[in-house]
Image (cartoon, coloured by chain):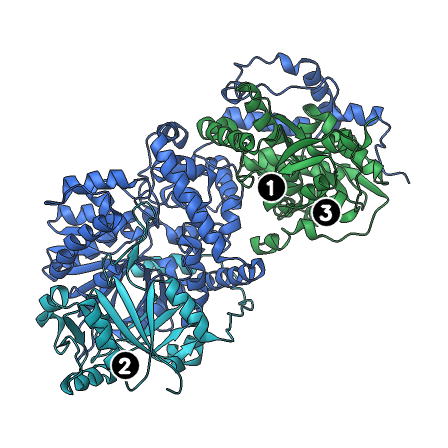
Chain colours: A blue, B cyan, C green
Amino acid sequence: MLSEKGAPDGENHGPRFAERAPDALNNPQLRRNFRRAMDGLMAKRAAQFPDPAYWAELRERGAAVKARALAKLPELLERLEAKLTANGVQVHWAETTEEANAIVLGILQRAGARTVIKGKSMVSEEMHLNAHLERHGIEAVESDLGEYIIQLAGETPSHIVMPCIHKNKDEISDLFAEKIPGLERTGDVDELTAAARRVLRERFANADAGISGVNFAVAETGTLVLIENEGNGRLSTTLPPLHIAVTGIEKVVEFLDDIPPLLALLPRSATGQPITTYVNMISGPRKVGEKDGPTAVHLVLLDAGRSRVYQDVELADTLRCIRCAACMNHCPVYTRVGGHTYNAIYPGPIGKILTPQLQGLDAAGDQPHASTLCNACAEVCPVKIPIPDLLVRLRREAVRPTETPATHLPVVKDGGAERSWNEALVWAGWRLVYTRPLLYRMVTRALAWGGNWVPAGAPLMRDWTKARAKPRFKPRTLHDLARERGYLNEVPK
Amino acid sequence: MSARANILGHLKAAPARPGPDLPPWTPPTYADKLARFRQMAEANHAEIHDVTAETWPERLATLLNNRGVGRLMVAPGTPRGDTLLRAAAQGVALPTLVPYDRAVEDLKDTLVHQVDAGLTGTRGAIAETGTLILWPTAEEPRLLSLLPPLHIAVLEEDTLHDTLAAVVRDQRWAAGMPTNALLISGPSKTSDIEQTLAYGVHGPKELIILLIKKGE
Amino acid sequence: MTTTNLAAMHTGAATPAARPDTVYFFGTCLVDMLYPEAGLAGMDLLRHAGVRVVFPEGQSCCGQPARNSGYFEEAREVARAQLDAFPGDIPIVVPSGSCAGMMKTHYPHLFEGDPDQPRAIAFAARVHELTAFLVNVLGVKLEDKGEPVTVTWHPSCHSMREMGVVEEPKALLRQLANVTLVENKRERECCGFGGTFAVRQTAVSTAMVSDKLASVRETGAGTLLSGDCGCLMNIGGHAEKVGDGTRCRHIAEFLMERCHAQ
């Protein structure tokens, strides 16, 4: 029935999360940069939701809007396509990031475009679009200040909303002085910003095409909603003669009325702003008589594994994500290791559930374990994605995949990738002991007697005692003490 | 099979799931919309000046002369643009008015490099977030509020709404969206460098709202 | 059961209940072997509050370690043993927000498609975290007989975010005249335990517990109290390893010692 085509090949092979983490952990500058940034973002978000009752009501609405849209996803995509087409927007469908790249390249080549200015788009990061265009002689310049900075540095985003959050001002000052011709090194943020404006203004003026992402696509009206603070998104979608938007198929919502609650949630959750400077709603190309705006608008709808995520009703909650990054801002793990440690397009809690589903468990089966399940992400998610439950579900798929009929693909690609006989045996033994009260009491008594003789170098204990003293088994268990103290074993008749 | 057919095929083959009913949500309302708008717009770094329908061009002239604005772009054929063009003809000491009167392709250098400010009307505003609503038209193009370093927007108090939800519903936006509908809340800004706010990164560095009070 | 329904159950603190005369006590496996005195103190507190406490000897573990490792079937069988061990329709009080959270918020989902699901749902509805039970159901009034001391509080992530227990333990501590409770500015941040996380992600876990201990030290309190022995084993174990003198104790033990010391 299904082919493996929907999911891109894993690109996350290489050192696992636990092996990558020490690099970041041992970089005090990076630790300070992230801690400071995340503390600020958490405080700003909290200030935007002072009334818990209103927050609860709003997020119920936001979650329901997205859940309802997902329940009708194929129908809404067809309606979106029909409406956009009627509005004069050309709609394209791509099963893989490779197909999406080919579509974008084709549009640009047919238009004779040589330079492209880009608004911020995580889907284009997923596609590695810039590299693809460069290989075909088309220059793509990032215009979001954060994206521009990391493009200059030859890096990848470390955060989905604030891509260069891992860099401090000094690092950016050095980078600009080195890369922007004629710029004296300056530590003044206004001057750095002005320098980027000067460079990018020319790029905007001369770009043959603009490429952007999409925050929400409204099926009812055929409207693409983009939010941003800088104005680069508006410029990318207004000044060049050609606009290509790329988006995941999960971004569609049914009605225009669905937008206000989502807009009330997204910037507040993301950066602690009541609203972004610009909300840009695009419903078509320049009409006859209009003086600006692109004369052609294209939308590329990308699957890249999403329709597979959609097959499982529980895991499909992942697709509610509106990419606000509140989960990573509040994640104690992300805060300490930063985005690059995840070695994935989407870092942090949402990445830990999305990456294994898009890339498969061979590539990213360890990611769901990079969590204490502290629930901080679930507490702040504006669309109520039960991230901790999905992390646990993916841990399960990695050791014991859900059974599916032979005609179907496994629920998650590379199910069982993390399975080990040792571990399975441990849990089988655990189950045996913990389901048989007499055996359990024999084992706990034995541990009470000899547990403290387990050497610090024993498996597991070795890892535990790297930073902690050995736990101490007590000579008498609570079972013993309860009985001695005269507590009843059962409710008297 | 096409990508379209495959994607839709996969989605349609997936187990059906019930779509939840939308739970109630009551967006806020404000007894004093203007006070809320003012507070939020100023928090967004917009500058608000109370003006009257009759004398706002003179007031604008003073404001712009004080700032040393030399060239102001306006939209001929719009009520606000025409008012200014008339005022200038009648001798109000406005900066040089540059009309946005042809396609961007023929005006790019002027727009990108040679104007200091742009003036637009507004369709209304949103009290909750201090937000201006603009629906650019053939006469009043999209870039007028974006490329010049200073954006001046004329707003009538009568057109204030509590929330985006209220205005989308009350004005039945879904019945017909323009090519581009815009919500603007303050000047262009970024905090990508160490979370330090900086204005004017790509769009206007300043936003001036000329507020025409009710019944004046 | 959908996650939406599960979410609706995440309101443990607000469960209204009439004052019962008998309750079950679920000690948890960690307390059973490593912190039995904390469990006993919890039972003694309940007894002092005037309820009869039953400790079924058939109890073992809530099943969370296996569930969180992805071994749902093993977790479910161990959970089923708990359903069997606590048959009466009376509250089940747990001296751990994490184990209580497992039983209250995850049992219904864990038994999805299992004939025992109705039993698991009924069981979940009877589960209470100890401090919330003392405050909300029993309305205990404590009398402090101890010397002046300054303490700080560590809420476990699951007690806060699965059981909704935030103010109750602090309310108990504030009843004690000679106890000064100082707030840890980062109290809501995870200590880095996370069960197998501590040994799977040693480096990150170490960074987290080290930061946690530093934030505790910043409060100036010499004693850290918590309602979860997993966190205590982690933070206390780290304090001991690095030679920090902070005492890490379960709140039940602390309350018993101050109010009912013999």
Q: Position of residue C20 (x, y in %)?
A: 84, 47
Residue type pointed to by label 2: Trp
Residue type pointed to by label 1: His
Q: Residue furthest right?
A: A493
For image coordinates 42% across by 48% down, the residue present is: A41
Q: Is residue C160 left or right of residue B116?
A: right
On the image, numbered disc 3 is attached to which residue? Answer: C119
Chain on which label 1 sits: C
Q: Is residue C110 left or right of residue B178?
A: right
On the image, numbered disc 2 is attached to which residue? Answer: B56
Mark-to-mark CA distance, 1 and 2: 60 Å
Check the image and report above or below for A393 versus B133: above
Q: Position of residue A414 (x, y in %)?
A: 40, 38
Mark-to-mark CA distance, 2 and 3: 73 Å
On the image, numbered disc 1 is attached to which residue? Answer: C158
Residue type pointed to by label 3: Arg
In this view, the residue in front, C235 or A170, is A170
Chain on which label 2 sits: B
| Disc 1 crowd, CA 10 A, few/some/many (<14, 14-19, 20+) | many
Q: Position of residue B6 (x, y in %)?
A: 33, 57
User: Which element is circle 2 on?
Assistant: helix
Chain on which label 3 sits: C
Residue B50, visible in the rendered structure: yes
In this view, the residue in front, C99 or B58, is B58
Whether labels 2 and 3 share one chain = no
Q: Is residue B191 left or right of residue A294?
A: right
Which quadrant is the C terminus of chain A positioned in?
A: top right
| Disc 3 crowd, CA 10 A, few/some/many (<14, 14-19, 20+) | some
> Of marks 1 and 3, which one's residue comes earlier in the chain?
3
Check the image and report above or below for B15 versus B184: above
Q: Position of residue A38 (x, y in %)?
A: 42, 44
